[in-house]
Image (spheres, rainbow, N blue to C red):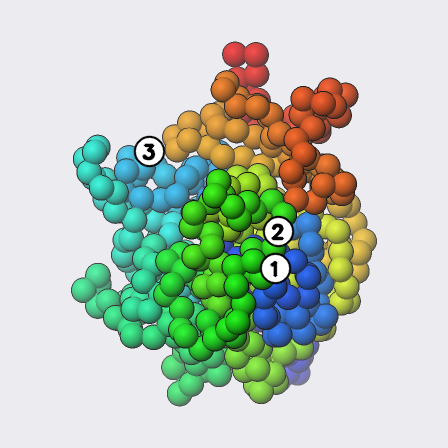
Amino acid sequence: MAIGTGSQELQANTRRPNLVYVFPDQYRRHAMGFVNEDPVLTPRLDAFAKEGVYLPHAVSNYPVCSPYRAMLMTGQWPARNGVMANCNSSRTHLDNFLKKDAYCLTDALSDAGYHTAYLGKWHLDGPPSTPEGERAVWDVFTPPGPRRHSIDFWYSYGAANNHMEPYYWTGDGGEDSRIDIKQWSPEHEADQAIAYIRNDGGDYRDADRPFAIFLSINPPHPPYHLVPDRYRELYTGKFVDDLLVRPNVDRGESGNKRAPGSVLDYFAMVSGVDEQFGRILDTLEAEGLADDTIVVFTSDHGEMMGGHGRMSKNVIYEESFNVPFLIRYANGIQARTDDLMLGTPDIYPTLLGLMGLGDRIPDAVEGVDRSSVIRDGSGVRPDAAAYMRLPPGRPSGGPRGVRTHRYTYQCGRPNQDAMLFDNTQDPYQMDNLAGKAPDLVKEMVGQMEAELERIQDPWLDRRGG
Ligand code: CA
């Protein structure tokens, strides 16, 4: 029948792009070789960056694990989605977990006809509450059903960190169906992602539908020493002074004690992640899918690695707040560097926009669709990004800040000084201008409050209180 043929043709011509969203944990923007900051070896990312759009000003608005993941999945700020801190058993009674009725990015993709996959760390569910004073439980099984948010191929765990002996739950089995693996987790997860992309045995996905994969690799998250020697050997002959090169890292007696012993392993993990990401790119190429697939490489937050005497994240300093964001879509965007300050809640609507699904962005999404900027540089660019940290269950609490293309400002709290940095003049944020430039402080307070107004942050309610 003519109508049938016509609709089949239409279907073939309007097949949506696939999505491969790769987000290793704690991978700072500076740890990509082409950026020329950290002395890392990342040949695959260096080549990939030239093939797509690179956003050097992308940020993680609340730079810690679960809040990032919840913003990614819901497109909402933590005060609305309820994930105000990392999920663990001490916070479950505060409803600090992803709600099962949230309409997530994977739900939207599934409803638009996608086959969806999630591999690696989830860290969005609340383990059963433990009594106060008891050691908190972090990892938890996510049962098949609404808590998996329409994800068809589930190969995941909650929050475990043994990179050499990872475990996963997959399929419809119960908690006792856990699979224990003896392989470096990024390599094992890349193997699974590759099998899914190739659709080995026809078992992984419905080949008639476009697919969307979220690959949540745990390294370069601690423990840093859990990395294969072959990646460590890439840095043979390098000493601490060759590796900890940022001027804001004190390498002397008063510096952070953990950074010197961790930095080589951190960079080794970065190189390992680069290699595994490259294997996925090679598979897309070999399967003839490279042009029709949107590929994103980003992270949930960075790593201080001794900067300002700190390790880890959850602070406004660039090493923590500024994240990699590379996106390739050969059939849909022009390769370039763009100063778009993409925030975490913007990712959900922006990806739907790039996939031609802008009309499916739910009203509940608070992020802004920046797909036109990524596609061809047109459209509105934000000039500020909010920084936040929330005590679980108390969305009006905690510090706030703002980052513009030039400045970083964090307001002071009792017993804590405000911070203001001119990132153009002082890229390592070593000269705090908060006590020296009152007019600039006033301007930045105004910019921060305007941004917090825009996103309806309850923090503003306590002003003057
Ligand atoms: Ca994390």
193 versus 240 height, above or below:
below
- The secondary element bearing badge 1 is classed as loop
- Residue topped by disc 3: 94
2 and 1 marks in contact (CB < 8 Å): yes
Which is nearer the eye, 451 or 60?
Answer: 60
**Residue 18 visible from this viewpoint:** yes
- Residue 420 located left or right of residue 375: left
Q: Work out whether mark 2 precedes mark 3 in sequence or the reverse, and give the earlier one.
A: 3
Judge by depth and name the residue closer to the eye, 346 or 246. 246
Q: Residue at x 40, y 87 (%)?
A: 201
Q: CA distance from mark 3 to mark 1?
A: 39 Å
User: Where is mark 2, residue-wise?
Assistant: 246
The residue sitting at 34% across, 75% down in the picture is: 183
Query: In 3D space, how far apart are the residues under numbered discs 2 and 3 (Cα atoms)?
Result: 39 Å
Q: Who comes first in sequence, dot 3 or dot 1?
A: 1
Q: Would you name the residue on which mark 1 appears?
A: 38
Please say if the residues under marks 2 and 3 sit with CB atoms less than 8 Å apart: no
Q: Vertical placement of 259 versus 289: above or below?
A: above
Q: Nearer the viewer, mark 2 or mark 1?
A: 2
Residue 362, given in percent of the width and then of the height, sits at 56, 47
Q: Give the amino acid type for the residue marked by disc 1 in the picture.
A: Asp
In percent of the image, x 80 and y 56: which residue is there?
377
Q: Position of residue 315 (x, y in %)?
A: 52, 39
Give the structural element (helix, strand or loop) at label 3: helix
Q: Position of residue 376 (x, y in %)?
A: 79, 60
Q: Residues within 10 Å of mark 2 (few under 14, many from 20)?
A: some
Left-right relation of 298 to 181: right
Give the residue type that dot 2 points to.
Arg
